[in-house]
C-alpha cells in the first residue's frame, strides 16, 4: 500500500493533464485535419512539379603498378627521371576534380548548350561561359575515393537520363585521353633527354643502363598510345538510369504529414490558450 499521498496526487494530476490535452486535440480535430490535408496535398503537388533528377555511376581502379624495373629506378634517379609506373589513385582523383578536365569535356562535347538554356548565356563573354560551365560540371560530377577498396566512384546527376550517362562516359574518356597524352609526353621528353646523354657517357655499364631506360620510355610511350587500361580500369561502366533519384516524393509526403500534424496540434493549443485568455479578460 502506497503511504505517500503526494505521489497519488501527482499521478492524478498527470492523468488529468493528459485528458485535458486529448480533449483540446479532439476539440480542434477538424482544424488539425485541415492543416494536415492542405500541407500534404501542397507537398504532393510541388513534388509532382519538381524536375526529375537521374543519377549515373561508374567505378574505376588504378592500373596495376609496374614492378619489373629491377635496378633501373636507381639509374633513372641519377638522371633526374622517374621510373615508369602506373598512376596512383590520388593522382587520378585530382585529375578528375581538376578544372582542366572539366574544361576539356565541355569544349570537346559542346556541353554549354546541354548544361544551360540559351537565355542563361546571353551577354556573357567566352571566359564567363567557360567558368559557368566548369561550376555547373562541379555541381553535377561527384568523385569519391574508397581507400579500402582502392576504387574511385564517379557519379553525375542531371535531368536527362541519357545525358547523365553520357556525362560520366565523357569524363572517363577524357580522363583516359588526358592521362595517356601526358604520360606519352613525359616518356618522349625523357627519351630525348636520355638519347642526348649517351654520347656524354663513356662508362659502358652506364651506357647499357641508359639504353635500357630508353627502352622503358619507348614502352611507356607505346602503352600510352594504346590508351586502353593505361592509367585505370573500368570496373563498372556508366549506364542509362531507369529510375529518378530526385524528388523523393513518398519521403517528402511523409515528412510533410509529420510536420503538419505537429503544427496542427501546436495551433490547436495556441488557439485554446487565446480563447482562455479572452474568457479571462471578459470576466
Image (cartoon, helix red, strand yellow):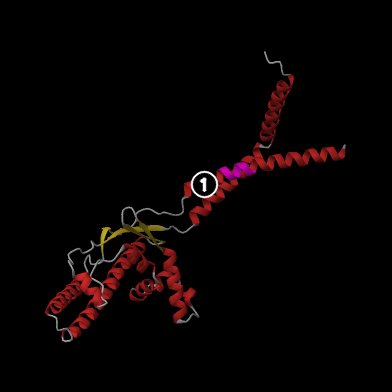
Q: Horizontally, is 281 left or right of 205 in the view?
A: right
Please identify the quarter of the rendering in which residue 201 is found. bottom left
Q: Looking at the image, is 80 positioned above or below residue 238?
A: below
- Residue at 56% across, 42% down: 258
240 or 126: which is nearer to us? 126
Q: Looking at the image, is 143 positioned above or below residue 250?
A: below
Please identify the quarter of the rendering in which residue 8 is found. top right
The verdict on residue 2 being magenta is no
Residue 192, percent from left and from top: 21, 83
Q: Horizontally, is 281 left or right of 222 in the view?
A: right
On the rendered image, what quadrant is the C terminus found in? Answer: top right
Query: What residue span does the magenta drawing correspond to?
Result: 258-263
Q: Looking at the image, is 150 positioned above or below residue 195?
A: above
Q: Which residue is mark 1?
A: 253
Residue 208, percent from left and from top: 12, 77
Secondary structure mostly seen in magenta is helix
- Residue at 30% across, 70% down: 174
Amino acid at each position: 500500500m502506497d503511504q505517500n499521498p503526494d505521489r497519488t496526487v501527482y499521478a492524478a494530476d498527470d492523468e488529468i493533464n493528459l485528458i485535458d490535452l486529448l480533449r483540446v486535440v479532439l476539440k480542434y480535430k477538424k482544424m488539425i485535419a485541415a492543416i494536415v490535408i492542405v500541407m500534404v496535398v501542397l507537398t504532393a503537388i510541388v513534388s509532382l512539379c519538381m524536375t526529375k533528377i537521374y543519377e549515373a555511376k561508374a567505378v574505376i581502379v588504378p592500373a596495376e603498378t609496374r614492378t619489373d624495373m629491377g635496378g633501373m629506378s636507381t639509374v633513372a634517379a641519377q638522371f633526374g627521371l622517374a621510373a615508369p609506373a602506373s598512376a596512383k589513385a590520388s593522382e587520378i582523383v585530382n585529375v578528375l576534380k581538376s578544372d582542366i578536365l572539366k574544361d576539356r569535356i565541355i569544349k570537346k562535347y559542346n556541353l554549354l548548350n546541354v548544361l544551360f538554356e540559351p537565355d542563361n548565356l546571353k551577354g556573357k563573354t567566352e571566359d564567363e561561359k567557360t567558368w559557368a560551365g566548369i561550376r555547373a560540371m562541379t555541381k553535377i560530377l561527384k568523385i569519391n575515393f574508397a581507400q579500402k577498396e582502392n576504387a574511385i566512384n564517379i557519379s553525375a546527376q542531371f535531368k536527362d537520363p541519357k545525358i547523365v550517362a553520357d556525362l560520366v562516359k565523357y569524363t572517363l574518356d577524357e580522363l583516359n585521353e588526358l592521362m595517356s597524352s601526358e604520360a606519352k609526353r613525359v616518356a618522349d621528353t625523357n627519351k630525348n633527354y636520355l638519347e642526348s646523354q649517351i654520347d656524354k657517357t663513356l662508362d659502358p655499364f652506364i651506357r647499357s643502363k641508359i639504353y635500357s631506360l630508353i627502352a622503358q620510355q619507348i614502352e611507356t610511350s607505346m602503352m600510352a598510345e594504346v590508351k586502353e587500361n593505361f592509367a585505370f580500369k573500368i570496373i563498372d561502366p556508366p549506364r542509362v538510369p531507369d529510375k529518378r533519384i530526385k524528388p523523393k516524393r513518398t519521403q517528402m509526403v511523409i515528412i510533410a504529414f509529420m510536420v503538419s500534424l505537429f503544427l496542427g496540434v501546436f495551433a490547436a493549443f495556441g488557439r485554446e490558450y487565446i480563447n482562455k485568455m479572452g474568457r479571462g479578460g471578459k470576466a
